[in-house]
Image (spheres, rainbow, N blue to C red):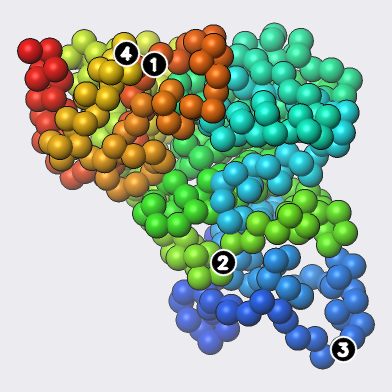
Amino acid sequence: MKKTNDPSTRIFDLLQFGEYGDVNPSITDSATYTFMQAITMSETFAGQQEGCYLYSRHWNPTNKYLADALAALEGTESAWVTASGMAAITCAILQLVKSGDHIVCAMTIYGGTFAFLYNYIKKFNIDVTFVDIRKLDDVSKAIRPNTKIIYTESMTNPLLQISDIPELAKIANEHGIKLMVDNTFTPMMISPARHGAHIVVHSMTKFINGKNDCVAGAICGDKEFIDALCDVNNGTAMLLGPSLEPLRSSSILKNLHTLHIRMKQHSKNAMYLAGKFKEYGAKIIYPGLPEHKGHEVMKKIMNPEFGFGAMIAIDMGTAARASRLMEAMELEGVGYLAVSLGYFKTLFSNSGKSTSSEVPEEIQREMGLSEGLIRFSVGLDNDIDRSWEKIKHCLDTMEN
């Protein structure tokens, strides 16, 4: 991995090939690794040997290729890959906190993360305060002497709120705590580490892999944090064991190299549909529209060539109306009524009844999550106008 001239930008030329000169790095099909000297094994267990592998739960060469590519993508010193996005999130959080600590968290986040922080982590005597992440004063006021993390998503799930990462980083640095950002919705579009985030996590299941054929996650951060995460004695990732299988790691690495092209097309299609929904009179949420409350913040932090992203949401008012529209769109061939995102086909689901169903209904109402909200992950359709005509037909049919 070769740095370009300006180290402050942390942009890398990625030069990776296999040991036989193969242009796709070789897949290491081993659980354990041999040593020619016993002392080298001892030093590797002690974390004193760079470039040595001892056991694939810790590191393996294939996963290292992918981790290096993700570090280059996010502009961090290092990275580690996991068997799911939730494994990345939970391992990174648990590495930083202990019993008696406190976390400040965005209220509007992925339902699985919300459930972990709202329900599960309590068993470790760790307290969490949920805030409207857009209200920076509220974030500052929520910090306590025992706070260790501010946790948010670049673009929150499912309400598509935009986190002001540079300002949140300032708050975190003032208090000597870590800003952790889930960048799953906005790879390439937003680079949290370049705006001051200390740790960036991903569900690679989504856009990074882009094919919905595997589950995987990633943790990106400085070398000290990643080394601690993988420490054989105290590392959360090492000891909890959420290892990514090397064959999957290799396929994700290949898919990663088309991410920049895919994100541009996803964003182009989403902007088109958002405009059409707006013209139609639907209650539309999309950060690319000037009336979105986070539009100016996103313009400030985004990498413009990749657009405003694939995620849009419309509010149909009731869960029943949302269900009718989604069922009609699936039959019409718009896409699939399915959770997840980042697929080449458009996916849509009623968030309050699916990916945010772990959030209690009273908190859903508090955060402004309508029971009729449909979240779209807009696909890579070549003829997006034809897709809109199908959606419009479904909408017209509902109104008749």
Mark positioned earlier in the residue sequence (2 or 4): 2
Q: Is residue 36 above or below residue 40?
A: below
User: What's the CA distance linking mark 3 and mark 2?
Assistant: 27 Å
Mark positioned earlier in the residue sequence (3 or 4): 3
What number of labels is visible?
4
Q: Is residue 257 above or below residue 384?
A: below
Mark positioned earlier in the residue sequence (3 or 1): 3
Residue 245: give its label: 2
Q: Is residue 79 left or right of residue 236?
A: left
Where is mark 1, residue-wise? Answer: 371
Q: Tag 4's secondary structure? A: loop
Quarter of the rendering containing residue 383: top left
Front disc: 2 or 1: 1
User: What's the CA distance linking mark 2 and mark 4?
Assistant: 42 Å
Residue at horizontal 24%, vertical 29%?
A: 326
Mark positioned earlier in the residue sequence (1 or 4): 4
Q: In terms of depth relative to the viewer, which is nearer, 288 or 32?
A: 32
Where is mark 4, residue-wise? Answer: 318
User: What's the CA distance linking mark 3 and mark 1?
Assistant: 62 Å
Q: Are marks 2 and 4 in contact (CB under 8 Å)?
A: no
Residue 213: give its label: none
Q: Are marks 2 and 1 in contact (CB under 8 Å)?
A: no
Where is mark 3, residue-wise? Answer: 37
Counting other residues with Cα less than 10 Å from the Cα at mark 3, is it few (<14), some (14-19), or many (20 or more)? Answer: few
